[in-house]
Image: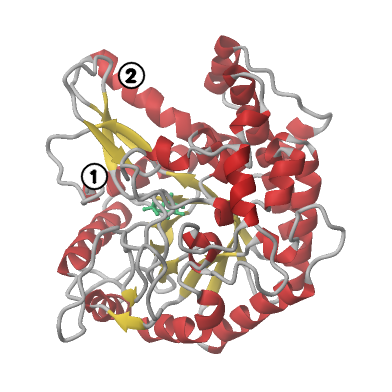
Amino acid sequence: MQPFKKDFLWGGATAANQFEGGWNEGGKGLSVADVARFKPDVDVQDMQKQWEITSQDIEEAARTTDTTYYPKRHGADFYHHYKEDIALMAEMGFKVYRMSIAWSRIFPRGDELEPNEEGLRFYDAVFDELKKYGIEPLVTMSHYEPPLAFVTEYDGWYNRKSVEFFLRYVKTILTRYKDKVKYWLTFNEVDSVIRHPFMTGGLIPDHFPTPEAFEQAIYQAMHHQFVASALATKLCHEIIPGAKVGCMLTKLTYYPYTCKPEDVLKAQQDMRATLAFSDVQVFGEYPAYLKALYARKGIHIQKERGDDEILKSYPVDFISFSYYSSSCSAVDTTGLDVAPGNTCAAIKNPYLKASPWGWQIDPTGLRISMVDLYDRYRLPLFIVENGLGTYDEVQPDGSIQDDYRIHYMAEHIKAMHDAVELDGVDLMGYTCWGCIDLVSNSSNQMSKRYGMVYVDCDDYGKGTYKRTRKKSFYWYKKVIASNGADL
Ligand code: BG6
């Protein structure tokens, strides 16, 4: 295979809420991730039940220091292992490392006027370590980690104050790290607020009188995130000349289950449900089809004067996205099987195999997704999440022979290569998800592993947290060294 372009950014991705740990150290406040409960009795494919949360659940969680049932509190303990972890990334040849800053480590409640210096120092140390090895940080400002006090006391992103609080945090980190970070993403999977409003938007269902009021709050929160994202982009360009800011979208790719025109239309509509979000961040305005949806549902967005101009004036520089699997759309779903996927469930595709969690494996879908996004936006793309979440078994000799992961990644990288070489897509880089094992977002399990480095920790947080290179570690090192030519 031809190598990728010379400056192609190979690397891996994590997020503080699932990887960092140190939940009660260095002055960090609680975030929504710290109250996400591991529910071993609930089906991992039933995401709505996994995510169900009430005010009472939150109060109980906030009272305990337990980490067994709140595994995002320990993650993979990057907080204490960052030097070792970054050395492993360097050994694989990473050019870029995607990570997030935990907002509640910088502003523990979200509403303070002054930041937590100890939190800022931690990320200084991380960025300095990355620099030592020539690894470029790609930083997500918000990855499922709104501070808990901001959520319980202010109703999170529903409250207009969210924009002010978030921008104070953003200004703080941009100013502090202006010489260390030049690639930024505003909100992880900004579209996910419609699927998990608590994690993304900090919205607690029982704070709202009716399901309709809750739905209204979701769209209002989404508006505030759009405005905050545009203003964060503006600030970033002002504070760090030459910096690049991307949006981050869950690329949910749907195929019509049959060639019946109604199924084709359904697939198109399902895709637009997430593309609407990047449309706003790229074109700087709400697409007509989203406005039509609001009119049908009776949703009314409260805007402040100047919001429309803000959206229009500060679009993103590039499009980043996660891609794990694809699924199907059908108008009549009678008798069709359902398959779970990244934060959603849809119709199962009979032509595809699936992971043990039921996520369907579809490398061609990655190529289709890239072409879709590039044809629509004509902006550089960045694949910031992709990978196989599955069980790994440690062999008696201590090794982890994860050929299935190598196969998954090789097929996806081939598809991405075709999108670049044959379809003309401009791709900045590829960061596979959970390059070092971390806690699953949807199921709070550690046993759903994505990494090329194994972390000795089980679903109950027990283990030494020792890091071990898997077979895929050596494979990915070779891929990066050959710039993608040797898969
Ligand atoms: C993406 C998220 O949705 O998918 C990550 O940005 C998440 O936070 C990843 O971990 C994989 O999902 P899961 O549920 O397998 O962890």
Q: Earlier in the sequence, mark 1 or mark 2?
A: 2
Measure the alpha-carbon separation of dots 1 and 2.
Answer: 25 Å
Residue 203 in the image: above or below residue 113:
above
SS of the residue at dot 2? helix
Which residue is denoted by mark 1 in the rendering? Answer: 358
Q: Nearer the viewer, residue 382 or 15?
A: 15
Find residue 81 and report its horizontal and vertical position in percent: 50, 82
The picture quadrant where one finds residue 412 is bottom left
Left or right placement of residue 118 versus residue 222 in this view: right
Q: Residue at x 31, y 82 (%)?
A: 468
Query: Disc 2 marks which amino acid?
Result: Leu
Q: Name the residue at the bottom extreme.
A: 132
Q: Is mark 2 within 8 Å of ligand 1?
A: no
SS of the residue at dot 1? loop
Alpha-carbon neighbours of circle 1 within 10 Å: few (<14), some, or many (≥20)?
some
Q: Nearer the viewer, mark 1 or mark 2?
A: 1
Q: Quadrant of the C terminus?
A: bottom left
Find residue 176 and report its horizontal and vertical position in percent: 76, 72
Residue 214 in the image: above or below residue 148:
above
Q: Nearer the viewer, residue 241 or 324?
A: 324
Find residue 232 and report its horizontal and vertical position in percent: 71, 52
Q: Could you say which disc has been placed on residue 265 in the image?
A: 2
The picture quadrant where one finds residue 486 is bottom left
Query: Disc 1 marks which amino acid?
Result: Gly
Q: Nearer the viewer, residue 146 or 232?
A: 146
